[in-house]
C-alpha cells in the first residue's frame, strides 16, 4: 500500500540516507557538546569577576564565537572546503560534513553554555571556595553539575539545528536525507521522495527532542 | 583562636572609596561563641569573609588557628580553609546533590576515601538530626533542614572554627531557635569556636558568650553579652539591646501613662543576672508599704544570666516612695524615674 502512495521511493537508499543523517548528527552533537562546553567555560571564566578574568582573552573568544555564529551555514560550508580537504582528505561523504557542522554549531552552543553557567548561584561557588575547593574541583563538581539541565536543553536545541544543517551539507555532497530529497526528489521531480525524506527528518528531530527533554527532566532537581 | 589587628578593607570604585572595615581589633578565644551585631552595611559581612580570605584585607593582620591568613595563597590557603568552615544565610547547597552527597562534598575536596566518607556522612546526619532524609534533594527540604545540611557540611572536615554568615536570618523564629540550639550543642560537644554575624539581638542573647557591635566598619563596643546588656554605652548598642528587652509597643503604651496627671511616679527598673530571678517586687511591697502597679515588662535569658526591664507605677505616701527608691538602689536594681510629680 505504502509503495502505491510513494511510488518513486527506493527504501533501501532512503534507509542508507537516514543512517548517514543520523551518523552526521550524532557525531557532530557529541563533538559540539565537548567543544561548546570548553568554549563556554572559557567565555564564562574569563568574564568579569570570575576565576580567569581577562579582558583580552574574553574579547577574542567572544569575537570568534560571534563571527562563526553569524556566517550563514551554507556559506560556512563553502568557506571550509579547503580546511575539510586538509582534515578529512575529501569533501564528499558524511564525514566530510563534520568539520563544517561542528564549526557552525559549537560557537552557538558555547553561548548557551555561557548562559547556563551564569545561572549557577555565586553563593554556591563561594561555599565551595570556603571549603578549600580549587578551581578544577569547582568546575567539575559545582559549575558543570549545577548547570547540567541548561547544558542538556542547550545541546538539544543545538542538535535539532544540526539535523537541519546536515540537510544543507547534503546539497554540497555530504549525502544523507537532505541530499536525497534534493537530488532524487527535487531535481528529478519526485515529490513523494522529498515528502518521505522530510517525514524521516521530522522523526529524527522528534526523537532528539524527546531524549533531550527526558534527560533535562531527570537531571533537574531544583 | 582568632585575632585581628588593625584590620581594614577599602573598596575602591571609579566613583568612590568605601571603607567597609575600619581598623578593627578583635580577639576570639578557643571554644567561644562570639557574636558580631550590626545593621546591614555595617561591614560585618565583609569582616567575617576576611576570616577565611573570601575577601582580602587592605591592611592589618588576621590570625586564625595560629595561621597568618593573609600570607597564605594557593594550596596552603585551601588547606587552611578546611579548618575554617562557613554556613550561609541562603544555605548555598548544591541542588544537584542529595543531602548525603552535599555533606560528602567537602570530604571529596579534602580527598577522603569513599568508605571513610560514607561513615563520616552518617555520623554527621545523626548529629544534626536529619536521619531519614539522606537521599532527599535540597528542594525537598524546609529552610531549617537545609541549614542543618549546611551545618553538617561545615562540620565534615572537623574544623576548628565555624563562621556563621547571618545563618538564621532567612528562618522563622521557631526554626531559628532550633538552629541556635544545635549550634550551642555543637559548641559544647566539639568545643568548636563559633563566630557569627547577625542583625538580631535575639541570636546574640541566646547563644553568644561575647558580642561586638559594629557600625560603619568600626567596632564601637564589645564585651561579655551580659555586660553589654547591663550597660550599653553606645546609642547603637542601646537600640539593639532594646530589641530584646522592650516589647516594641512599650514606649507607646507607657507614654499614655506618663501624660496622665493622676498617677504616682513611673519607674523603669532594670534587673540583671541573678537579681532578675529574685522576688524583689514582693520585698519592695512588704518593706516600703507602697502599692506597685505593673505597666509593662519583659525578662530575657542570656547564657550568663537574665536581663529584664519592668515599668511600674508606685503609689503611696511620699515618705514611703522615697524609701522604695532607696530600697531598689540597695538591691542593685537600676531604677530610672520616668515621671515624678
Image: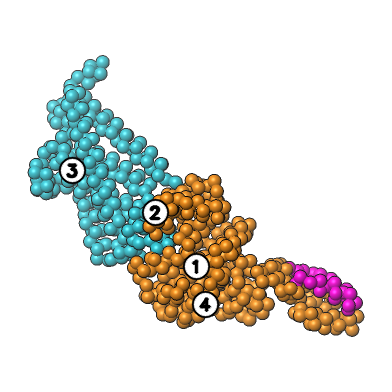
Q: Colour of chain A?
A: cyan
Tag shown at residue A145: none
Q: Nearer the viewer, residue A105 or B116?
A: B116
Sequence-wise first label, 2 or 4: 4
Q: Residues within 10 Å of mark 1 (few under 14, many from 20)?
A: many
Sequence-wise first label, 4 or 1: 4
Q: What's drawn in magenta, residue-wise?
A: B276-298
Q: Nearer the viewer, residue B314 or B112?
A: B112
Tag shown at residue B161: 1
Inter-mark Cα distance, 4 to 1: 13 Å
Side of A81 where A154 appears, left or right:
right
Inter-mark Cα distance, 3 to 1: 55 Å
Which residue is located at x 51 percent, y 59 percent?
Answer: B151
Inter-mark Cα distance, 3 to 4: 64 Å
Tag shown at residue B27: 4
Tell me which chain the residue with mark 3 is part of: A
Residue tagged by mark 2? Answer: B113
- Say whether residue B341 is visible: no
Is residue B296 rendered magenta in the image? yes
Which residue is located at x 28 percent, y 33 percent?
Answer: A204
Amino acid at each position: 500500500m505504502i509503495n502505491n502512495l510513494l511510488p518513486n521511493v527506493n527504501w533501501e537508499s532512503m534507509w542508507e540516507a537516514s543512517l548517514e543523517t543520523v551518523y552526521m548528527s550524532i557525531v557532530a552533537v557529541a563533538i559540539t557538546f565537548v567543544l561548546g562546553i570548553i568554549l563556554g567555560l572559557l567565555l564564562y571564566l574569563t568574564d568579569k569577576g570570575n576565576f580567569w578574568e581577562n579582558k583580552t582573552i574574553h574579547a577574542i573568544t567572544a569575537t570568534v564565537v560571534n563571527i562563526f555564529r553569524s556566517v550563514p551555514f551554507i556559506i560556512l560550508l563553502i568557506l571550509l572546503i579547503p580546511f575539510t580537504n586538509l582534515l578529512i582528505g575529501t569533501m564528499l561523504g558524511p564525514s566530510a560534513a563534520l568539520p563544517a557542522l561542528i564549526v557552525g554549531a559549537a560557537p552557538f552552543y558555547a553561548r548557551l553554555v555561557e548562559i547556563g553557567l551564569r545561572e549557577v548561584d555565586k553563593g554556591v561557588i563561594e561555599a565551595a571556595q570556603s571549603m578549600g575547593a580549587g578551581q578544577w574541583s569547582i568546575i567539575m563538581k559545582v559549575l558543570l553539575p549545577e548547570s547540567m539541565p541548561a547544558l542538556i536543553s542547550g545541546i538539544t536545541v543545538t542538535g535539532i539545528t544540526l539535523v537541519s544543517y546536515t540537510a544543507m551539507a547534503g546539497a554540497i555532497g555530504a549525502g544523507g536525507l537532505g541530499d536525497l530529497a534534493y537530488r532524487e526528489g527535487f531535481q528529478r521531480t519526485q515529490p513523494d521522495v522529498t515528502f518521505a525524506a522530510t517525514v524521516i527528518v521530522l522523526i529524527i528531530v522528534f526523537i532528539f527532542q524527546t531524549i533531550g527533554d527526558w534527560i533535562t527532566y531527570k537531571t533537574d532537581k531544583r | 583562636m582568632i585575632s585581628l589587628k588593625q584590620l581594614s578593607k577599602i573598596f575602591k570604585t571609579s566613583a568612590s572609596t568605601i571603607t567597609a572595615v575600619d581598623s578593627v581589633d578583635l580577639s576570639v578565644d578557643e571554644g567561644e561563641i562570639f557574636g558580631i551585631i550590626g545593621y546591614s552595611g555595617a561591614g560585618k559581612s565583609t569582616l567575617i569573609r576576611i576570616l577565611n580570605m573570601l575577601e582580602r584585607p587592605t591592611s592589618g593582620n588576621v590570625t586564625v588557628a595560629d595561621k597568618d591568613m593573609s600570607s597564605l595563597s594557593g594550596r596552603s590557603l585551601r588547606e587552611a580553609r578546611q579548618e575554617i568552615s562557613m554556613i550561609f544565610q541562603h544555605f548555598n547547597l548544591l541542588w544537584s546533590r542529595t543531602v548525603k552527597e552535599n555533606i560528602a562534598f567537602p570530604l571529596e575536596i579534602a580527598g577522603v576515601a569513599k568508605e571513610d566518607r560514607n561513615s563520616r556522612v552518617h555520623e554527621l546526619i545523626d548529629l544534626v538530626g536529619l536521619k531519614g532524609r539522606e537521599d532527599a534533594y535540597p528542594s525537598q527540604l524546609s529552610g531549617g533542614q537545609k541549614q542543618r545540611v549546611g551545618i553538617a557540611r561545615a562540620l565534615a572536615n572537623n574544623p576548628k572554627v565555624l563562621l556563621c554568615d547571618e545563618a538564621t536570618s532567612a528562618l522563622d523564629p521557631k526554626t531559628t531557635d532550633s538552629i541556635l540550639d544545635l549550634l550551642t550543642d555543637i559548641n559544647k560537644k566539639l568545643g568548636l569556636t563559633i563566630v557569627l554575624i547577625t542583625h538580631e539581638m535575639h541570636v546574640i542573647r541566646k547563644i553568644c558568650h561575647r558580642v561586638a557591635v559594629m557600625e560603619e566598619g568600626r567596632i564601637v563596643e564589645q564585651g561579655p553579652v551580659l555586660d553589654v546588656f547591663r550597660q550599653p554605652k553606645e546609642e547603637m548598642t542601646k537600640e539593639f539591646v532594646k530589641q530584646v528587652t522592650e516589647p516594641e509597643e512599650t514606649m507607646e503604651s507607657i507614654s499614655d501613662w506618663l501624660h496622665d496627671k493622676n498617677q504616682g511616679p513611673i519607674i523603669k527598673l532594670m534587673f540583671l543576672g541573678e537579681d532578675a530571678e529574685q522576688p524583689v517586687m514582693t520585698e519592695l511591697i512588704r518593706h516600703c508599704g507602697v502599692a506597685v502597679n505593673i505597666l509593662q515588662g519583659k525578662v530575657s535569658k542570656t547564657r550568663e544570666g537574665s536581663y529584664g526591664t519592668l515599668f511600674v507605677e508606685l503609689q503611696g505616701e511620699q515618705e514611703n516612695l522615697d524609701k522604695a527608691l532607696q530600697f531598689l538602689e540597695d538591691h542593685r536594681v537600676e531604677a530610672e524615674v520616668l515621671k515624678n510629680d
